[in-house]
C-alpha cells in the first residue's frame, strides 16, 4: 500500500531507524486485528420515499416513517389516497432495519410491484408500486437527495405565480384522467374559468391576475369535489379536472362556483364576474384533446355572452 507523501528513496529519521533492533514489535497477542465486519456501521440516514407519478392529484413525495403504514381510502390511513379503485385498507408497508416489504390486504383491485400483482413483496430502490390507479416510484434516499428531487418535481409542475399546477401538468393529467375514465367507464368534466371578467389595471396586472387565479382556485376547491385537480391553464384562466362528475353534477358545481366567486366582490369592485366553459367526457369528446377543445369553445361562448354566464352546449 502506497502512503501519500512517502518517498522510499528518502531516509526517514525515526527512533527505529537510528537504533535498529532496539524497538521490537509488540507480542502478537497484544496486537488487535479489526475486520470490516467488526467495525461500527455507518448509518447514511436513508429513508423510504414514495414519489407519486400518476393518480390522485398527488404532488409531493411521501416518507414512510412508521414500522407499519397503511395505504388506503379510509380516514386515518397512514397514506390516504383519493382513488376510487383503492380499497379502504388496500395494502401496508412494513419497515425493518434492512428493507421494506409491501403486503396486500385482500384489496379489491390488487397491489402491483413493477406491473406484477403481489401478495407480499420486498421493495427495492426504483420499483414501481401501483395501488389502484395510483403509481409511486420507490426510492431510498437521504434527506438531501430527496430535497433536490422533490424540489425539481415541484418546480417542474407548478405555476410560480399561484402555486397551482401549471399548464403542462394539467394537459398530462387530463390525458391520464380521460384514459382512466374510459377504462373504468365513469364520467369526467373539464372546467375552464376566466378571471378576465373584472377590469384589472395595466399597472401591476400580472400580480393582480395571480391574485384572481388564487381566489378562483380557492372557490373551486370549496365546492366539495374531493377529486378535483386544479391548475393554471393560462395567465387569465384556471382549469379544473372533475373526475367522476356527471354532467348535471359538474354544471351545478360550475354555477355555484360562479355565484360564490361573484359574491366575494366588494363595493369597490362591482364588476367582478366569472366566465366558465364546461365540457363533459364521454358525452362531448372521445379524447383529452377533444375535451379540451370543447371546453375552450364553451369558454369563448361564455365570454361572448351578455351577461357573463357559464356556457353549456
Image (tube, rainbow, N blue to C red):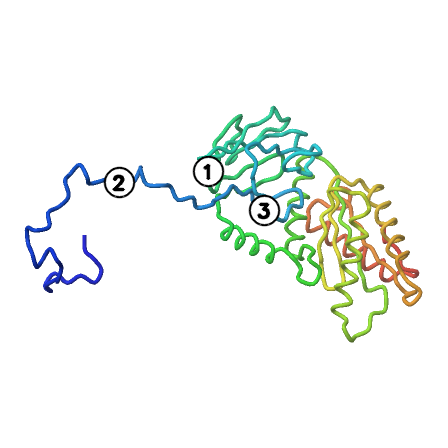
Q: Secondary structure at mark 1?
A: loop
Q: Secondary structure at mark 2?
A: loop
Estimate the x, y position of residue 167 in percent, counting from the top left: 67, 57
Q: How many marks?
A: 3
Residue density around tag 3, few if under 14, some if 14–19, many if 20 or more, within 10 Å: many
Name the foreground residue: 106 vs 292: 106
Marking on residue 124: 1
Q: Is residue 16 left or right of residue 89?
A: left
Estimate the x, y position of residue 3 in percent, counting from the top left: 20, 57
Estimate the x, y position of residue 204 in percent, counting from the top left: 76, 73
Q: Secondary structure at mark 3?
A: loop
Vertically, is 272 above or below 256? below
In terms of image quadrants, where is residue 265?
Answer: bottom right
Name the foreground residue: 258 vs 312: 258
Estimate the x, y position of residue 8 in percent, counting from the top left: 12, 60
Q: Residue at x 56, y 56 (%)?
A: 152
Between the residue at mark 1 and the residue at mark 2, the CA separation in whole angstroms equals: 31 Å
Name the foreground residue: 7 vs 197: 7
Residue under label 2: 34
CB under 8 Å between discs 2 and 3: no
Vertically, is 59 above or below 270? above
Marking on residue 61: 3
Vertically, is 124 above or below 192? above
Q: Is residue 259 left or right of residue 86?
A: right
Q: Is residue 33 left or right of residue 232?
A: left
Residue density around tag 1, few if under 14, some if 14–19, many if 20 or more, within 10 Å: some
Q: Residue at x 29, y 40 (%)?
A: 36
Marking on residue 261: none
Between the residue at mark 1 and the residue at mark 3, the CA separation in whole angstroms equals: 17 Å
In terms of image quadrants, where is residue 181?
Answer: top right
Q: Is residue 7 left or right of residue 294?
A: left
Amino acid at each position: 500500500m502506497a502512503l501519500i507523501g512517502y518517498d522510499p528513496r528518502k531516509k526517514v529519521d525515526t527512533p527505529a531507524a537510528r537504533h535498529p533492533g532496539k524497538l521490537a514489535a509488540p507480542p502478537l497477542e497484544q496486537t488487535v486485528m479489526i475486520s470490516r465486519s467488526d467495525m461500527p456501521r455507518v448509518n447514511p440516514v436513508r429513508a423510504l420515499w414514495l414519489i407519486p407519478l400518476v393518480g390522485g392529484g398527488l404532488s409531493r413525495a411521501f416518507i414512510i416513517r412508521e414500522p407499519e403504514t397503511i395505504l388506503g381510502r379510509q380516514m386515518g390511513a397512514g397514506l390516504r389516497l383519493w382513488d376510487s379503485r383503492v380499497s379502504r385498507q388496500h395494502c401496508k408497508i412494513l419497515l425493518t432495519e434492512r428493507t421494506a416489504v409491501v403486503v396486500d390486504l385482500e384489496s379489491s383491485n390488487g397491489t402491483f410491484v413493477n406491473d406484477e400483482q403481489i401478495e407480499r413483496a420486498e421493495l427495492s430502490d426504483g420499483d414501481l408500486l401501483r395501488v389502484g390507479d395510483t403509481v409511486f416510484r420507490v426510492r431510498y434516499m437521504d434527506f438531501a437527495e430527496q430535497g433536490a428531487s422533490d424540489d425539481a418535481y415541484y418546480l417542474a409542475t407548478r405555476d410560480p405565480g399561484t402555486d397551482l399546477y401549471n399548464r403542462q401538468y394539467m394537459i398530462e393529467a387530463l390525458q391520464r384522467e380521460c384514459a382512466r375514465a374510459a377504462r373504468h367507464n365513469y364520467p369526467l368534466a373539464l372546467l375552464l374559468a376566466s378571471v378576465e371578467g373584472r377590469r384589472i389595471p395595466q399597472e401591476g396586472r400580472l400580480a393582480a391576475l395571480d391574485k384572481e387565479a388564487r381566489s378562483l382556485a380557492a372557490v373551486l376547491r370549496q365546492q366539495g369535489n374531493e377529486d378535483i385537480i386544479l391548475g393554471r391553464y393560462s395567465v387569465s384562466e384556471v382549469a379544473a379536472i372533475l373526475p367522476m362528475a356527471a354532467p348535471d353534477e359538474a354544471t351545478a358545481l360550475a354555477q355555484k362556483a360562479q355565484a360564490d366567486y361573484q359574491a366575494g366582490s366588494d363595493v369597490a369592485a362591482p364588476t367582478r364576474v366569472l366566465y366558465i366553459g364546461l365540457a363533459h367526457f364521454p358525452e362531448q369528446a372521445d379524447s383529452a384533446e377533444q375535451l379540451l377543445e370543447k371546453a375552450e369553445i364553451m369558454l369563448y361562448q361564455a365570454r361572448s355572452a351578455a351577461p357573463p354566464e357559464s356556457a353549456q352546449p
